[in-house]
Amino acid sequence: MTRTALFAAVAALSVAAPAAAQEKPATTAQIVEAINACKAIVSSTWVDLKKLPSMGWEPYRKSTGSRQMKVGGAYEKRGNEALLVVGHDELKDKSCVVLARLGGGGAYGATAQGVSEVIGMPMGQQDFTYTWDQGAQRVTLDPSGDKAAPKARFAVIAVKGDAR
């Protein structure tokens, strides 16, 4: 999903009344759980969305008054404030995106540090983008949202040549 399309999807998610995911800031454990779900479904040949329900991830539903609307390409898990996003571009690029609302202040740096404590130190940093080498996948972290509602955008991207 291009950044423009991803931001449009995020904007659409924010128009309706809040659902379970993204009401509160995601914890490091919730973010890592979402990253691990992405890692489980992404390979260089396929993004296996059929694995998500067995890990507790279901299509994201947004409340619109008395009705619930399914948001295509977005997935949520009860008890996890992070969202998974797998749109057409992610399917094409063999990737999966984790969107996580952050607390205020220095939450972005604290989130990067907390994730590093679990998945290992990043192999690089350029400006505010962190990159981790995870063998068959690469994980990147970029800031998202705005000052009033900061978010982190993690992308799990298949490394070419992985044939899981």
Image (spheres, helix red, strand yellow):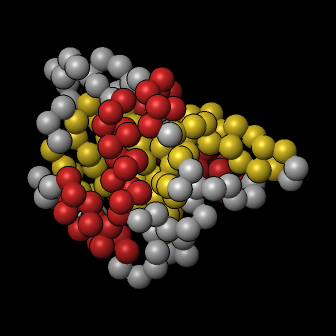
Indicate the position of residue 155 as horizontal and vertical percent values: 35, 44
Report the front residue among 4 and 81: 81
Above-or-below relation of 124 to 4: below
The answer to which image quadrant residue 120 occupies is bottom left
Above-or-below relation of 33 to 114: above
Indicate the position of residue 75 as horizontal and vertical percent values: 55, 40
Residue at the far bottom: name it: 105
Q: Residue at x 33, y 53 (%)?
A: 32
* Residue 60 visible, this orientation: yes
Report the front residue among 149 and 28: 28
Above-or-below relation of 114 to 7: below
The answer to which image quadrant residue 136 occupies is top left
Indicate the position of residue 9 as horizontal and vertical percent values: 60, 44
Above-or-below relation of 47 to 28: above
The answer to which image quadrant residue 138 occupies is top left
Question: In the picture provided, is 97 more to the left or to the right than 61?
Answer: left
* Residue 126 visible, this orientation: no
Q: Residue at x 28, y 49 (%)?
A: 140
Quadrant for the C terminus, please: top left
